[in-house]
Amino acid sequence: MKTKKSNSRATALITGASSGIGEVLAQRCAAAQYDVVLVARSADKLQALASSLSSQYGIDASVQAADLARPGAAATLAAALQRKNCTVDVLINCAGVLQQGPFADMDSALHQGMIDLNISALTAMLSAFLPGMVQRGSGRVLNVASVAAFQPIPTLATYAASKAYVLSLSESLSEELRGTGVTITTLCPGITATNMLTQASGANQKLNELPSFLIGDVEEVAAQGLAACLRGDAICVPGAVNQAAVIASRSAPKWLVRRIGGLLGRKAL
């Protein structure tokens, strides 16, 4: 990787970059002429993506294979980039995991895995990279949550709760950072046909049974999320259907929101 002193391009770091929304966000950043740092567990997938992006867009793409769910992984990553004189201008926290099923039927390790990656790792990444952005007086952060963040969803209880944490933390930080030159955006997509969804729920057949307007296009989700991040918007909910659902969840009685959430958890996934 070239250092920040050898070119004028800003750098975007994308976690969960090996597939799904994270991969498309990495492609969008490269197309916008950001150098990219690709982070995920799968080094081989990241290397292939890095080569493709560098060749196609003429940017510098580097790979940092890491399991961010491990304690200390974010700090280790930040230290490695500091040694390379790499300053992160845009931080995209997309790494996450989804597990579906009745809470009591799921192994405790599955619940803990969602907490470790969706909550602890994201918090550690913010802690590792936000102070430098604030000190420099500039930076953009995109935290990927879900429309599930706005309501409880039985059979997705831990996942929805983890995304509610992401949304609440991000909104708090958005206000804390007002006037610093650093912004936090929360991307809250609805059902999006990605590998994470189909692998977590075995949902290929169920997804095919859903009306097409309920399934978000990963390219559009990534495009809207990155645009909102660069504008400094606090929240981005792609799609009119998802926006309507969010409004309804905030105005409807809690008991009704829970019932609808249960129906979505059992039927949509």
Image (cartoon, rainbow, N blue to C red):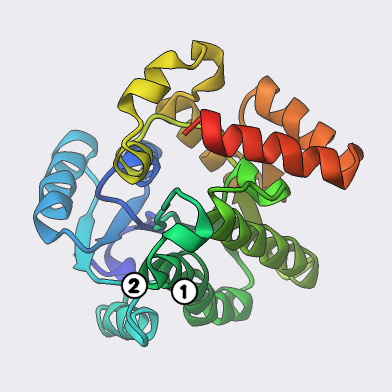
Residue at the spot 89% in from the left edge and 37% down from the top edge? 252
Between 197 and 131, the residue placed more toward the observer is 197
Relative to 32, 49 lies left or right? left
Would you call the spot at circle 1 few (<14 residues within 10 Å), some (14-19), or many (20 or more)? many
Residue wearing tag 1:
125
- Labels in figure, total: 2
Q: Is residue 100 visible?
A: yes
Residue at the spot 34% in from the left edge and 44% down from the top edge? 196
The CA distance from mark 1 to mark 2 is 9 Å
**Label for residue 68?**
2
Kind of residue at badge 1: Met
Q: Are marks 1 and 2 in contact (CB under 8 Å)?
A: yes
Relative to 179, 119 lies left or right? left
Q: Give percent across and percent down for residue 243.
A: 72, 30
Between 51 and 148, the residue placed more toward the observer is 148
Q: Secondary structure at mark 1?
A: helix
Closer to viewer: mark 1 or mark 2? 2
**Label for residue 158?**
none
Q: Give percent across and percent down for residue 96.
A: 41, 57
Q: Secondary structure at mark 2?
A: loop
Q: Is residue 90 visible?
A: no
Between 72 and 139, the residue placed more toward the observer is 72
* Quarter assignment of residue 64: bottom left
Between 16 and 58, the residue placed more toward the observer is 16
